[in-house]
Image (tube, grey):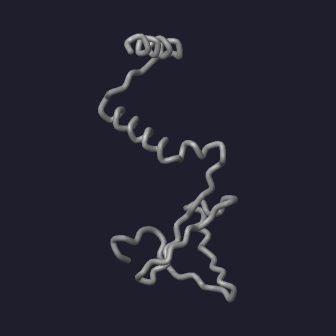
Amino acid sequence: MTAETQGFHGYVGLQRRGVISLPAELRQRLHLDEPGAQLEITERADGVIELRPALPVPADQAWFWSERWQQREREVDEHVAAGRVTVHESGDDFLTHLDKLDAAE
């Protein structure tokens, strides 16, 4: 195994119609045994075929995984890591804080 290889390494048979079976432990660890799971397949110029697990995102959660929302999540993580956060003990405290921010604008 190379430094790039992690986890499972082995061989799987290719059946007549192009069907392959992934080992059960690999399917379970990568959640590929869940309904709707798919594999993304990429053929590289060097002849390597890459398979990547692709789990479906429920429609009501798709907004969270948009690039814009993920950028906002990264910004929040940066603020938290830098200590630029305010903790509110209750929803009322938070609303009061927002009112103060609005009044300052």
Q: Position of residue 4 (x, y in %)?
A: 36, 70
In this rendering, would 68 be left or right of 40? left
Numbered disc total: 0
Which quadrant would the C terminus be assigned to in this image? top left
The image position of residue 78, as x and y in percent, is: 34, 37
Residue at figure coordinates x 55%, y 64% from the top left: 53
> On screen, 48 above or below 35?
below
Name the image quarter holding the N terminus: bottom left
User: Residue 47, percent across and down?
Assistant: 45, 83
Tell me which corner region of the image, top left, top right, bottom left or bottom right, holds residue 17: bottom right
Q: Is residue 1 above or below residue 81?
A: below
Nearest the viewer among 89 and 70 is: 70
Q: Residue furthest bottom?
A: 16
Measured as percent of width and height from the top left, residue 75 is found at 38, 38
Q: Residue furthest front?
A: 105
Where 14 sits versus 82, above or below? below
Residue at x 39%, y 21% (from the top left corner) = 86
Quarter occupied by residue 37: bottom right
Q: Residue at x 61, y 63 (%)?
A: 32
**Residue closest to the eye, 33 or 83:** 83
Residue ID at (50%, 79%)? 10
